[in-house]
Image: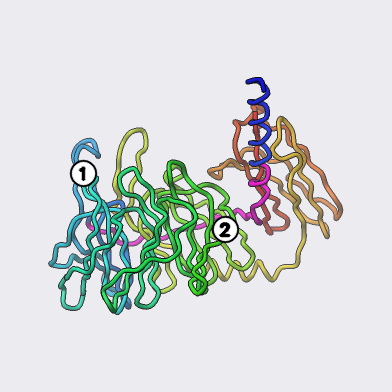
């Protein structure tokens, strides 16, 4: 077979693959979100963890840069910061832990278990430190069998699951389980992919969303604890890495990203739909998250903008009760429109977007790029009930062709929004 035919066949296979992937996403909704400012932590770090014991936030580990410009030198945080409800500032415990970043930290029986992580020179630790905030003391637990950093973790009663991760340039698919009662380790079925991960526990299952193994990932995997079995669940709207997960109700929040640092998304476990938020979030990589009193806290993290490396002390929060109230209100609205998948998809240079209105509505149909920036408005008018087909020629509002990549088209009918994803290839 000639080289030209091989290239053509490879391109066709790629298009088929992208088409299958791009149409496998569930419903996507675009929304706005306003975060509140909270008291800043003392040390601006990345790769740290934040946990909750009763009504107190504990902030542990991470790396921070100092010098002029930022990034001239690095230091690893060995302090334990904490914040109680009646204080509008953070306090520092009079104790020092081993300084390390990209750790895992989970709470069991009111003790904090700090596991693995990476040293300032890239060394990987097998250390397990067990910190007791009441006695302000630390002891060592049994070392993790396979030392690693940037792993996902969840705690279920007395069991702490360490999932995936990396050691130097090697990615892991291991799932090691630490029993806090017996101070011992065991293993369960491996993750289907070897990668740096983030994980959470919801409705009796462990969810791994996104990650990194040389490239950002968009896969969702679910682990059935009773069956000791992993299953592929689907895809995120965009690949995501250097992020954090948080669980509230039947939702999983995805916070931050290595590339699109402003990213906040929410996964609805009930119908596998996604909400992508535009917000006042100060975008960060490797932040930490914690939920306390119906508020999602996003703490510290870093960025590298225009070659300026910055670690943040800032803390922002999301009122989760208001989000779920809005969700319930929208769910009670009658269905006013049906948005269909564009065709063709992928496309070049034009595609058709079809939708059906069940009654007269004021309609907007807009195109957004992968970071949520509005590219073009195709419809902005009141329309009677009926079927509609709108053509998009791949141009922005200035008449210029957009670059290749994924785009989101959003239909808004009387305030009810529905969105889908499409791929433009030049």
Image check: 404 left or right of 58?
right
Instruction: Give the residues drawn in magenta, as a range.
Output: 19-42
Q: Residue at x 32, y 63 (%)?
A: 50
Q: Secondary structure at mark 1?
A: loop
**Of pointers 1 and 2, the one earlier in the residue sequence:** 1
Kindly identify which numbered label has been placed on residue 232: 2
Q: Separation of disc 1 and disc 2 at Cα?
A: 35 Å
Q: Nearer the viewer, residue 173 or 50?
A: 173
Q: Nearer the viewer, mark 1 or mark 2?
A: 2
Q: Secondary structure at mark 2?
A: strand
Q: Which color scheme did the rendering employ for the protein?
A: rainbow
Q: Nearer the viewer, residue 288 or 110?
A: 110
Choose top left, top right, bottom left or bottom right for residue 38: bottom left
Q: Nearer the viewer, residue 405 or 357?
A: 405
Give the percent coordinates (x, y) of residue 394. 68, 32
Would you name the residue on which mark 1 appears?
121
């Amino acid at each position: 077979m000639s080289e030209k035919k091989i290239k053509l066949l490879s391109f066709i296979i790629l298009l088929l693959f992208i088409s299958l992937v791009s149409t496998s996403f569930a419903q996507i909704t675009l929304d706005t979100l306003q975060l509140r400012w909270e008291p800043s932590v003392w040390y601006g770090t990345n790769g740290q963890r934040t946990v909750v014991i009763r009504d107190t936030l504990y902030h542990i580990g991470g790396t921070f840069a100092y010098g002029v410009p930022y990034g001239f030198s690095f230091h690893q945080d060995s302090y334990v910061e904490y914040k109680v409800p009646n204080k509008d500032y953070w306090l520092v415990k009079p104790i020092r832990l081993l300084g390390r970043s990209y750790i895992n930290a989970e709470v069991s029986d009111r003790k904090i278990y700090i596991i693995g992580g990476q040293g300032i020179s890239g060394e990987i630790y097998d250390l397990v430190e067990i910190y007791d905030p009441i006695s302000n003391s630390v002891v060592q637990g049994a070392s993790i069998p396979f030392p690693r950093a940037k792993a996902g973790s969840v705690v279920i009663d007395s069991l702490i699951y360490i999932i995936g991760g990396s050691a130097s340039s090697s990615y892991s698919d291991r799932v090691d389980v630490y029993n806090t009662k017996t101070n011992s380790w065991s293993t369960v079925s491996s993750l289907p992919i070897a990668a740096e991960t983030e994980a959470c526990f919801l409705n009796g299952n462990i969810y791994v969303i996104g990650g990194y193994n040389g490239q950002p990932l968009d896969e969702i995997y679910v682990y059935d604890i009773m069956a000791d079995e992993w299953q592929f669940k689907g895809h995120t709207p965009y690949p995501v890495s250097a992020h954090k997960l948080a669980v509230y109700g039947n939702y999983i929040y995805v916070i931050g990203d290595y590339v699109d640092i402003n990213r906040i998304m929410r996964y609805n476990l009930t119908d596998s739909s996604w909400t992508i938020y535009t917000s006042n979030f100060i975008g960060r990589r490797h932040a930490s998250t914690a939920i306390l009193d119906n508020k999602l806290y996003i703490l510290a993290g870093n960025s590298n903008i225009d070659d300026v490396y910055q670690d943040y002390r800032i803390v922002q929060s999301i009122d989760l009760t208001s989000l779920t109230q809005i969700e319930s209100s929208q769910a009670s609205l009658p269905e006013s429109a049906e948005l269909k998948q564009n065709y063709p998809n992928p496309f070049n240079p034009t595609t058709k977007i079809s939708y059906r209105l069940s009654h007269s509505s004021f309609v907007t149909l807009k195109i957004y790029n992968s970071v949520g920036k509005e590219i073009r408005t195709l419809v902005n008018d009141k329309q009677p009930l009926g079927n509609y087909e709108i053509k998009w020629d791949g141009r922005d509002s200035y008449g210029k062709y957009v670059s290749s990549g994924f785009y989101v088209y959003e239909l808004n009918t009387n305030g009810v929004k529905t969105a889908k994803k499409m791929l433009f290839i030049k």
